Amino acid sequence: MLTTIDQAGRIVIPKEIRDRAGLTPGTEIEVEYTGASITIHRAVPAPKLDRVGGRIVARPSGPAEGRPPVDVAAIVEAERERWRD
């Protein structure tokens, strides 16, 4: 999606993206400049790795109330739509 930078240097993240990423007012984000690209990441604590049986499982380490709701089926369907011929 295309957006612009205003006179104060602010960037508006489109509502659809904010909703999917769980970005609400006050959400901390991380901005990185790498050569020719600027990337924005939601600042979240790294997952904790636990051994469950013979497998290693990544579990969230942050508080549950700070996590955005995730609709996995909707994400999968959106990706399928993106790659349809």
Image (spheres, rainbow, N blue to C red):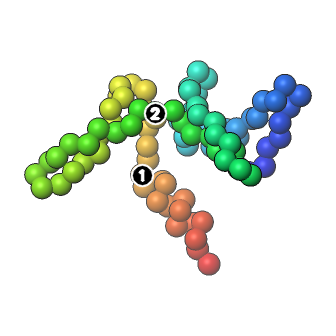
What kind of residue is marked 2? Val
Q: Which residue is mark 1?
A: 72
Corner quadrant of residue 47: top left
What kind of residue is marked 1? Val
Front one among 45 and 21: 45
Secondary structure found at label 1: helix
Q: Which residue is mark 2?
A: 44
Residue sitting at the far left: 53
Single out the mark in the foreground, 1 or 2: 2
Residue drawn at (36%, 29%), measured in percent from left and top? 62
Residue drawn at (79%, 43%), measured in percent from left and top? 3
Residue 36's x, y, as percent?
74, 52
Using residue 83 as the reference point, say whether residue 48 is left or right of it: left
Residue drawn at (83%, 40%), measured in percent from left and top? 4
Relative vertical location of residue 63 with respect to residue 20 in this rendering, above or below: above
Do the numbered discs 1 and 2 sit on residues whose CB atoms are within 8 Å? Answer: no
Corner quadrant of residue 85: bottom right
Residue drawn at (59%, 34%), measured in percent from left and top? 30
User: Marks 1 and 2, Cα distance to the nearest angstrom?
Assistant: 19 Å
Residue 42's x, y, as percent?
54, 36
Disc 1 packing (10 Å; few <14; some 14–19; many ≥20)? few
Front one among 18 and 48: 48
Residue 65's x, y, as percent?
39, 25
Residue sitting at the far right: 7
Say if residue 58 shows up in the picture.
yes
Relative vertical location of residue 56 with respect to residue 13 in this rendering, above or below: below
Which of pointers 1 and 2 lies earlier in the amino acid sequence? Answer: 2
Using residue 25 as the reference point, say whether residue 56 is left or right of it: left
Say if residue 16 shows up in the picture.
no
Disc 2 packing (10 Å; few <14; some 14–19; many ≥20)? some
Q: How many marks?
A: 2
